[in-house]
Amino acid sequence: MRSDIHTLLIIRTEVPHNEENIKRPYDISELELCIGDELYMGKLLTKDDITYENHNFWWHYLLLCRGFDDEKELNLDDAVRDVIDEKKAVPDILAWHREFCPKDGVDRDGYYEDPNFIAGNLKNGMSFAIEFHAWHINYYLNDIYIGNLGGHFEAWFLTWNELLAFDRYDYLFLLLLPMTGIDPNQREQAEQLICEKLKEITLFSGHEPYVAKCIANGLVIEGVFEEVQDIGLTSHTNHSVRNIEKYPRYTEDVIALNKALKGFLSSDQ
């Protein structure tokens, strides 16, 4: 049974920035469910903000994915614009972007003190938060940083099976897709499911297979996910928080999330 993300939107309270200057979400332990429209403070994105009819949001969001057309040697954003006329598809995208990512209140690293965000408490002790900054989109599970889309990106944290567990909630498949890494043998399945999801966004009508292929290109990882004793699942891929051999500072976070994700996946059985 699919869960409606509208019932999962939450309020946050401020916590200090970490030493990496990656701004963490508000303390998940202090989150409250926000089912109404007037309970929150700040810039909480509601279901209406991310509905598939909101073409501006999904154009902005999906074109930031690290996909590419390997034949034309184009990054995803250029590849999509090569087949879809941006001026016709999203004629007011610039005005929308100025409002969604205003220049006011941005620090020198491209962060807002009070960014747009979407977050929620899921089942079996799992929660998520996604923050939209001027130059970055930061991702968290259980108040633990798992990666970002930006100049110094970190991605490929979730496995394909882990992503599928989040798909029981509306929109979370596409929202967490940029943080997912897939093996080459999962590519066909990934392309097919991404294509099906894109069909719900009429913006990409007629081009879903091509866009899905480009997105999948950016999900295939060179390294592999590997189980390590006393730690759980790790990655050998560069720019992945789960690569604790290269980024040992994330070891404790990876251990904690491995336990949480294991419980989350078991609840999906």
Image (tube, grey):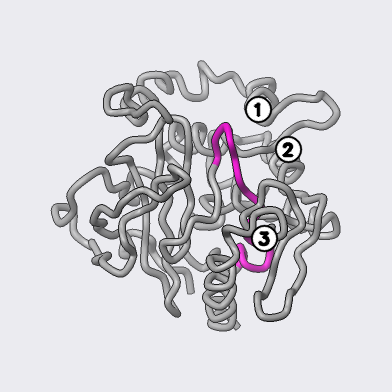
- The quarter of the picture where residue 81 lies is top right
Q: CA distance from mark 3 to mark 2?
A: 28 Å
Q: Which residue is mark 2?
A: 214
207 and 170: which is toward the camera: 170
Q: Which residue is mark 1?
A: 80
Residue in view at x 46 percent, y 31 percent: 135
Amino acid residing under circle 1: Val
Q: Position of residue 63 (x, y in %)?
A: 58, 33
Q: Which residues are magenta?
A: 149-164
Q: CA distance from mark 2 to mark 1?
A: 9 Å
Q: Secondary structure at mark 1?
A: helix
66 and 136: which is toward the camera: 136
Q: Position of residue 148 (x, y in %)?
A: 53, 44
Q: CA distance from mark 1 to mark 3?
A: 34 Å
Residue in view at x 31 percent, y 26 percent: 99
Residue in view at x 36 percent, y 29 percent: 101
What secondary structure is the magenta-colored segment mainly?
Answer: loop
Q: Position of residue 218 (x, y in %)?
A: 72, 42
